[in-house]
Amino acid sequence: MQDRDRDPVARRLARLAVDQRSAATATPGPVLCVAPAGSGKTTTVVARLAWRVAQGADPATVCALTFNRAAAVELQARADAALVELGHERGEVRVRTFHALGREILVDAGVDVRSIVERSALLAELAGGPLPSSQLRHLDDAFTRLKLAPERGPGPEDTGTHAAFAAYQARLRADGAIDLDDLVALTGPTLEKDPPLLARWRERAAVLFVDEAQDLDKSQLDLALLLAGERRDIFAVGDDDQTIYAWRLADVRRVLGLAARLPGLRRVDLQTNHRCAPEVVRRAARLVEHNRERFDKRILPSPRTAGEVHLLPDSGDDVARARLLLSTWAREHPDERHAVLARTNRELTPYAAIALELGLPYRAEEDGLLLDDEWLDPVLADVDRTWPLLPAVAAASQRAELSDDLAGTLLTWAAGLPHVDALEDTLRERRRARERLRRDDANLTLATAHGTKGLEWDHVACIGHDEGAFPSGRAMAEADDPTRVLEEERRLAYVAWTRARVTLTIVYDPGAPSVFVREAFDVDEWA
């Protein structure tokens, strides 16, 4: 007991659950740690990192790869704290995003990476002006596929996109510049062409950790395996049930088939969800078990007892539903953290509007209110003030060729107001309220399910669980393989549901409930 008390690694391991400790101390070599939502993967990774260093690994040869800067900052801080306990200096372990590591390697190879081009700016320059957001998104996604997964890029019939890509690449070459995708796309080939460079970086990543392995695109996986080399001292951690970024070129089959590319791969499983109330775990597991493309595994709740799952039938009045939910949260547990999660940003608009109405601070990447969109003021300036307000607004919206969604939003704002001046006053007040209430430290978060992985809240409401909405009917209709899209949509719902620590509320249309409601609940519960 005394030896353990003096040994920081032993103390750290003793605090782990049995499955976490088994993963953290697995024999070095190629290891895949399958870590369901809430199972403590980062805690396990840090414990393994500390254990490997205590077992003799040089911190300068330990490298951990993550997907985004926030995850890298958190993991670096926690790794540094563990190293300090062992008498090492902060920063000795290298924690990087794939892009950051690619940049370091390219700099070491003598590649000029000072000019990393902002793609949207260059596209606007080539087009002679700003592009519509929809066209910009299309080109951005297509260019990424052409760089990182040419087999999944636009078909040969899409001559316009291919021509735009050729012009874009020619301009990069002429300027001696690269873009963000190149930081990964160029790194592997650069290493393969330069054996001394490859040997140097294999030594710097002799003990390699890969976070969120299920989200690796082909270029990232190729780079990780290239660095691992024949030594294959790699600890990959991820969850096939959380593969939700196909549009970023993730493919669940990549992690499911990892053993084929890593001979001798051993799999260790974390089984217990320590985050969510048992009923949340049970419903989420029941849902995702309908997928065929997944590892056979158990997802267990922790022994905690607090927490509930609620089914909330939607009357069809989104504004009334938002008012009821947000006012209840504000009244019953005002100091706890809440989130409203949706399939798309559009569904969050009534919740943002009610947050403004109730004076509730909220956090949102996009809130759908469109208060600062460039279309709003010109339309209002064009309203015929001699007409009744609603017909005048409708006519001005038509002249401006607003989409049905935008026009509908504006008409909703105008409903019940006597004239244009009142509408303008209302909108000015909403803008002021938004500036005051929309802030990053708010207890209430409005977000899409795609933006929530790695996050958690005390109380979560997942809205829009209606047939055709979630899973997305549009995504299914446009897919070459609707079955695979359905499975990714199911994984997306699983991710959203498992953000809830205490209560999960699922809002659905009782007349047309989502297949996910029907899969996770018995008919007498939702009908």
Image (spheres, rainbow, N blue to C red):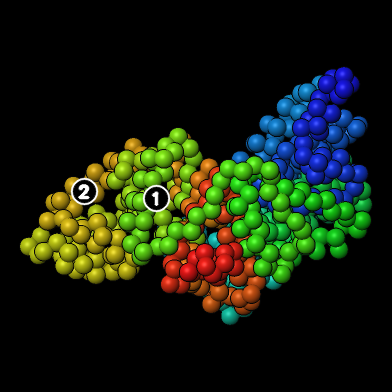
In terms of depth relative to the viewer, which is nearer, 274 or 150? 274
Q: Are marks 1 and 2 in contact (CB under 8 Å)?
A: no
Q: Which mark is residue 426?
A: 2
- How packed mark 1 is, by other alpha carbons closer than 10 Å (few <14, some 14-19, many 20 or more), is some
Residue 397 percent coordinates (x, y): 24, 66
In terms of depth relative to the viewer, which is nearer, 206 or 256? 256
- How packed mark 2 is, by other alpha carbons closer than 10 Å (few <14, some 14-19, many 20 or more), is some
In terms of depth relative to the viewer, which is nearer, 372 or 213? 213
Q: CA distance from mark 1 to mark 2?
A: 24 Å
Residue 514 percent coordinates (x, y): 51, 69
Q: Quadrant of residue 497?
A: bottom right
Looking at numbered disc 2 in the image, what kind of residue is underneath it? Thr
Does residue 246 show up? no
Depicted 273 relative to depicted 347: above or below: above
Does residue 306 show up? yes
Disc 1 is placed on an element classified as helix
Point 57% across, 64% down: residue: 521
